[in-house]
Image (cartoon, helix red, strand yellow):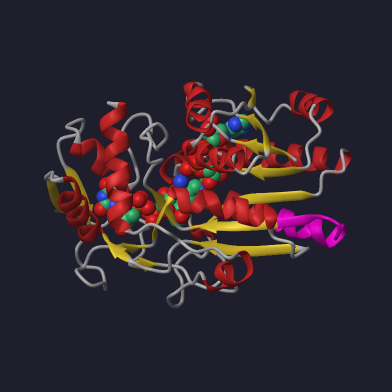
Amino acid sequence: MKILVTGGCGYIGSHTVVDLLNENYDVVIIDNLSNSKKDVIEKIKKITGKNVTFYEFDMCSKEKLREVFEKENISSVIHFAGLKAVGESVEKPLMYYENNLISTLNLLELMKEYNVKKIVFSSSATVYGNPKSLPIKEDFPLSTTNPYGTTKLMIERILKDLYQANNSFDITILRYFNPIGAHFSGLLGEDPNGIPNNLMPYIMKVAVGKLPILSVFGNDYNTIDGTGVRDYVHVCDLSYGHVLALKNPKPGLKIYNLGTGRGTSVLELINTFEKVNGVTINKKIVGRREGDIDACYASIDKAKEELGFEPRYNIEDMCKDSYNFVKKSN
Ligand code: NAD
Ligand code: UFG
């Protein structure tokens, strides 16, 4: 079985490609390297001892995408490709709508044309907006607060409409919570360009002295210690969720949360990182970041029941693997 992985050089995509190769799938990657590096391909080969086909282009080009469908005998698609920085999406909404929506429409049109019916799509917990209660279940109301989140919600809507029109499509929408951690080899992980927006990449840069101090955004939230609570999930657990979604025999349109079901505060994450890695993270408490919510964690009962999704790694593992990666890559 040949799986097309869009955005396969990125953080979650690269880990998923490793899992797919380990499960003996053939893999074709498309990535324009707008937020990743080509050496990821060599690293994937090194980890798995297997080959992968790589195409470098922007999926907004339908003609280039068509060439891949023409040449490769694709049986299923995992669609990671997209821009994902919340703040940037507020500043450059048109770039986000164009990149995330046009690439997806091109992909879906070609899947239809070439009779490829199975797709797994990367959505996000951001589609739940400010949840009415916790843990968050898949049937909670949906809303967004920024253009990035709106692209995810719009693509979910497009997929639902596509399925409505043609129920031979087999569609899985995965709503990720907060992926952190890295491959245990230290070869793959998250290494954003410039100053990171997300907590763990920021902690990692402070840990290796690339940034002087971490700002903790608010300690007056209604949480265990006043700092924001999130559901951090090891990227290797998340990536394996995609293999489970591909193997899921249940037909139709399915939506699953992928997280751990446990909330961890900012201070808890920092303390664990310091403890397991024997380092000190310089930090200061500052005001809240606009748009942040108190707490967000998933109910993963549905993914457990229907996919057999069972997270294997805890916060300690996530902190160790993140540090191992950042030490090796700096
Ligand atoms: P990432 O930026 O590391 O990977 C995305 C990849 O897609 C990159 O390699 C980028 O170069 C590529 N890409 C972007 N636009 C493209 C285009 N037009 N054509 C071809 N390639 C393109 O991000 P990630 O963290 O691996 O996230 C993967 C997916 O999961 C994204 O859709 C993201 O929105 C979603 N997601 C991520 C998180 C998270 O916290 N990391 C949370 C929820 C959802
Ligand atoms: N935080 C800090 N300091 C920082 C960065 C973050 O204190 O420098 C805090 C935030 O206030 C929040 C927590 O750390 O309480 C987590 O923040 P992240 O930016 O790491 O993650 P978010 O939950 O805000 O958002 C991320 C992605 C979204 C995605 C969401 C759910 O950025 O795109 O996870 O998947 F929608």
Where is residue 117? Give x, y as percent. 81, 49
Residue 69 picture quarter: top right
Q: Residue furthest bottom?
A: 133
Does 170 appear in magenta?
A: yes
Residue at x 58% of width, y 65% of height: 308
Residue 218 in view here = no
Region of the chain picked out in magenta, as a range: 157-171
Question: What is the quadrant of residue 95 in the picture?
Answer: top right
Q: Quadrant of the C terminus?
A: top left
Image quadrant in which the N terminus is located: top right
Q: Residue at x 77, y 43 (%)?
A: 108
Q: Is residue 308 left or right of residue 207?
A: right
Could you say where residue 180 lies in the image, as x and y percent from the top left? 38, 48
- Of residue 230 and residue 52, the one placed in the foreground of this image is 52
Q: Nearer the viewer, residue 312 or 155?
A: 312
Q: Relative to residue 140, is residue 165 depicted above or below?
A: above
Find residue 121 and report its horizontal and vertical position in percent: 64, 50
